[in-house]
Amino acid sequence: MTAKQSTQPKLRVSGATKVYNTRSGDLTAIDRCSLDVMDGEIVSIVGPSGCGKTTLLWSMSGLHGLSSGEVLLDGVPVTGPNPEIGLVFQEANLLPWRDLDANINFPFEIKGTKPDRAWINELLHRVGLDGFGGRYPRELSGGMQQRAALVRALSYKPSLLLMDEPFGALDAFTREEMNRLVEEIWMDTHTTIVLITHSIEEAIFLSDRVVVMSPRPGRVASIHEIPFPRPRSLDIMASSEVFNLMNTIKMEIVGSRQSRYPQGGTAAAPQPARAAE
């Protein structure tokens, strides 16, 4: 199964440039990035640390304004938070004083709308959190908290889901489980997804295309089509085709760093360093 076919992109990033004004001078995090994401497509973005992946994703969300360029969702400029865009962060960011049900209801309270309990209950069942609605975040494991964050992001049925390294802190087994869960939900909903990840294997498993970014200032260096049918099995992920593709992408990332720092050194990161991740 592949992404839905469309002649117009769901998300269009055109000439996106973001310059941060820091104490040590201007820092260009991303420079003239352009990317189209089609309706129902899963696109992963990978690249060396500090290349601006998170800056690009936050610009897509409307949470970070661009210095130049634009982001369009269904042809409409994204200039701030948008109810059509769901976000899953590196940390679950559940409110510790609210139980699971109250955390999931929070976006609806902000929007002043009624939660779709049938859909939420279906999502909770899919992620294995039936019966945990009265539990507080401190009573949930890291994997359970990330499942809850995924449910919260999908609860209001966004047409675009942005995910910023959401499973990076999980153990390998739980991360693999979450990847399969995302694929299962996607096959039912075909929600358009853009994923930031440091795992090339995760990017290949989940994506229709993998975008490789250059070192800072981040630009789109290459785009790889992922030809494997869905659902994707562990057998496919162990194949020589996947291994070769993983190696190609890895060498692009490693080679880009070596080209920038030929003596093996690293550039001093201007403060605040977090801004360019």
Image (cartoon, helix red, strand yellow):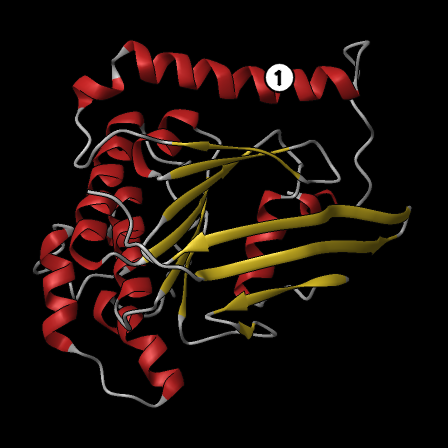
Q: Residue at x 21, y 70 (%)?
A: 101
Which quarter of the figure is the N terminus placed in? top left
SS label for mark 1:
helix
Q: Residue at x 37, y 25 (%)?
A: 201
Q: Residue at x 12, y 50 (%)?
A: 128
Q: Amino acid at mark 1?
A: Val
Q: Position of residue 136 (x, y in %)?
A: 26, 61
Q: Is residue 247 above or below residue 195?
A: above
Q: Foreground: 219 or 116?
A: 219
Asked if residue 36 lies left or right of residue 110, the reply is: right
List the single residue furthest toward the bottom.
Answer: 112
Quadrant hosting residue 58: bottom right
Q: Is residue 265 above or below residue 93?
A: above
Q: Residue at x 16, y 65 (%)?
A: 133
Q: Foreground: 113 or 193?
A: 193
Quadrant hosting residue 116: bottom left
Asked if residue 234 lies left or right of residue 223, the reply is: left
Quadrant hosting residue 142: top left
Q: Position of residue 187 (x, y in %)?
A: 18, 50
Q: Which residue is mark 1?
A: 254
